[in-house]
């Protein structure tokens, strides 16, 4: 249960009467937790899907108005806001899928097979934006994870740094015992000290220019935090030595032979 595996165990309901009663109560609790998670997941998914229908009609009406009236600043603003809504709904559906229990699809993977392609793509993306992304060597260790889910989380963190960094982004990976320490830093405007703990909340928008005009939905770091927590890891934000934001992630590694 502590690892997020909400499965009924029939073995708990064997033995003496006291153990059977405690085991039955525990299994009932597991069923109740699963039901609550399932209902919340279904509600979030249904809301996201239902929002898409009026949004589609809105964009069709905006396109028809463009044909009849020609281009105008007001219609352009409607189109911009509609695009933002579409991005937000897409992120909501992504968050909804992340919240589904992923423990059934865990597998042991070398860190290099997980991270090499992501880091290479990130360096290419930074170069296209005229920025420099430096990466340390990837430790030769194994990790049990849901590969797509975990890589989506790390991609959100790194792309966030690339987007807000002015010139320089640093990604550091270190194996400390049976823990992976990942640090992503940028030289952007950063986040106020009193808001560092809030940036992982869904839809939270920081008060500085870092997020005010970004057009983002405020869900990328929330999705990352959720996925990392499902992998029994932790994530925190702090001020970077480069002047911007530091996001630090810890994840469990498989023990070395």
Image: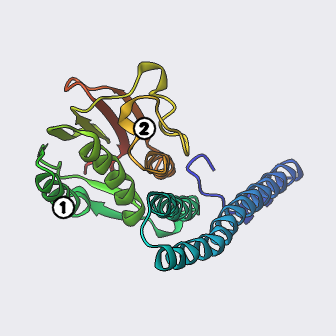
**Image height check: is 229 above or below 235?**
below
Residue pictured at 36% horizontal, 39% vertical: 250
Q: Residues under labels 1 and 2: Cα distance? A: 27 Å
The residue where tag 2 is placed is 212
- Say whether residue 5 is left or right of residue 224: right
**Image height check: is 228 above or below 121?**
above
The residue where tag 1 is placed is 121
Front residue (pair 236, 138)? 236
Question: Dot 1: within a 10 Å radius of its alpha carbon, few (fewer than 14), some, or many (20 or more) residues?
Answer: few
Q: Secondary structure at mark 1?
A: helix
Is residue 255 visible from the viewing direction of this image? no
Residue pictured at 56% horizontal, 59% vertical: 92
Q: Indicate the quadrant where residue 20 lies.
A: bottom right
Q: Earlier in the sequence, mark 1 or mark 2?
A: 1
Front residue (pair 133, 54)? 54
Residue pictured at 78% horizontal, 52% vertical: 26
**Image height check: is 202 above or below 198?**
below
């Amino acid at each position: 249960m502590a690892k997020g595996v909400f499965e009924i165990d029939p073995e708990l309901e064997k033995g003496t009467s006291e153990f059977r009663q405690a085991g039955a109560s525990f299994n009932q609790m597991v069923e109740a937790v699963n039901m609550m998670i399932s209902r919340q997941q279904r509600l979030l998914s249904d809301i996201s899907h239902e929002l898409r229908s009026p949004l589609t009609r809105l964009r069709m009406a905006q396109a028809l108005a463009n044909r009849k009236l020609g281009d105008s600043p007001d219609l352009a603003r409607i189109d911009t806001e509609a695009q933002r809504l579409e991005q937000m709904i897409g992120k909501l559906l992504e968050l909804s899928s992340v919240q589904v229990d992923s423990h059934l699809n865990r597998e042991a993977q070398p860190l290099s097979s997980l991270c090499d392609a992501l880091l290479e793509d990130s360096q290419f993306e930074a170069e296209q934006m005229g920025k420099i992304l430096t990466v340390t060597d990837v430790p030769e260790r194994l990790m049990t994870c849901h590969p797509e889910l975990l890589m989506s989380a790390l991609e959100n963190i790194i792309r966030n740094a690339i987007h807000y960094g002015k010139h320089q982004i640093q990604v550091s990976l270190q194996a400390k015992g049976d823990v992976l320490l990942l640090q992503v830093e940028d030289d952007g405007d950063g986040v106020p000290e009193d808001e560092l703990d809030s940036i992982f909340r869904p839809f939270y928008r920081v008060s500085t220019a870092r997020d005010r005009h970004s057009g983002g939905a405020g869900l990328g770091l929330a999705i990352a935090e959720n996925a990392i927590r499902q992998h029994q890891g932790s994530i925190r934000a702090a001020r970077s030595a480069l002047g911007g934001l530091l996001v630090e992630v810890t994840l469990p590694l498989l023990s070395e032979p």
